[in-house]
Amino acid sequence: MIKKYIPKPPPEPVITGSLTPEPKRRGRKRTKKQYFTPDTDLAIKEYLASSNQDERDNIFKTRIHYPFYKLAENLIHTFKFYYTEVDDLEDLKHEVICFLLEKLDYFKPERGSKAFSYFSIVGKNYLILYNNNNYAKKKIKADPLAADEDEGVLHQLGRDQRKQEIKDFIDYLTDYIDKHMFTMFKKEDDLRVCDAINVLFKRRENLEIFNKKALYIYIREMTEVETPVITKVTKKLKLIYKKLYSEYAETGYVRI
């Protein structure tokens, strides 16, 4: 069941004493406590440098999990990603943390990328797709006629996606893009678009839109970049797609 989480309003303030405002206090404003600290960056580097799984697990548990938890929490509430299939937002936060953990090995600190920026983009892209899919499902449930109109297209596309050969190739393709993304693209906007497209490929079975123009708008919403950048990245990915598919058709796999 698709639910929209609605935050509870804050309690009404209780007014006591004089209504005369207190004089302003001098000094620096109190700042929010940082959760993504220099130690988080260092922990991520140590995690990536280690080949010992027990050491990696300990680093993640003691030094990375909490920053990822707070990042997921802030993304959900800042951008109001409240259309969810879970009963408790803690479950959604856990899903985001698991997704960020999957992405850890693809982060390349040696390229000068900032961990907070990278994982914020990755997490936001995941939540945009998750939230919009659930919102679309809710609209279809509210208006069954809308679902009937698209039934033929959805059925055809779903049948094509169920072909094991195509599914296997797309899985190879997304793994390849994850591994080589930072080699294929250098600019931050290009990387945002590439990652967004790759997320769409991975979640393709949950997509409710298949129109090219709509997908462009969807990607632009996810990345906040202009259409020419999206076009440039998609053209390059199309060339990579053709090259890898030729390899897959000949050998039955893709060298990642």
Image: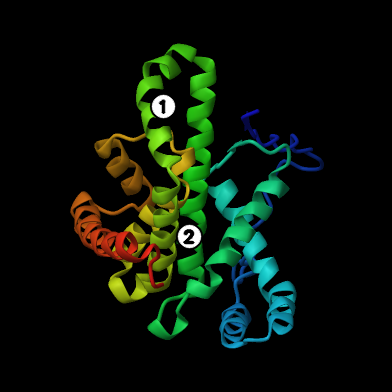
Q: Earlier in the sequence, mark 1 or mark 2?
A: 2
Q: Residue furthest top?
A: 145
At 69% from the left and 74% from the top, the residue drawn is 60
Residue 91 in sight here? yes
Disc 2 designates what residue? 122
Which quadrant does the N terminus fall into? top right
State the residue in front, 85 or 248.
248
At 65% from the left and 60% from the top, the residue drawn is 70
At 48% from the left and 29% from the top, the residue drawn is 136
Left or right relative to 234: residue 144: right
Residue 24 in sight here? no
What amino acid does circle 2 point to?
A: Val
Disc 1 designates what residue? 155
State the residue in front, 99 or 239.
239
Work out how far the residue at label 1 is from the one at label 2, CA to CA, in angstroms: 30 Å
Q: SS class of the residue under badge 1?
A: helix
What amino acid does circle 1 point to?
A: His
Left or right relative to 134: residue 9: right
The picture quadrant where one finds residue 168 is bottom left
In percent of width and height, residue 123 lies at 52, 57
State the residue in front, 198 or 21.
198
Crowding near the residue tagged with mark 2, few <14, some 14–19, many ≥20 C-alpha atoms within 10 Å: many
Which quadrant does the C terminus fall into? bottom left
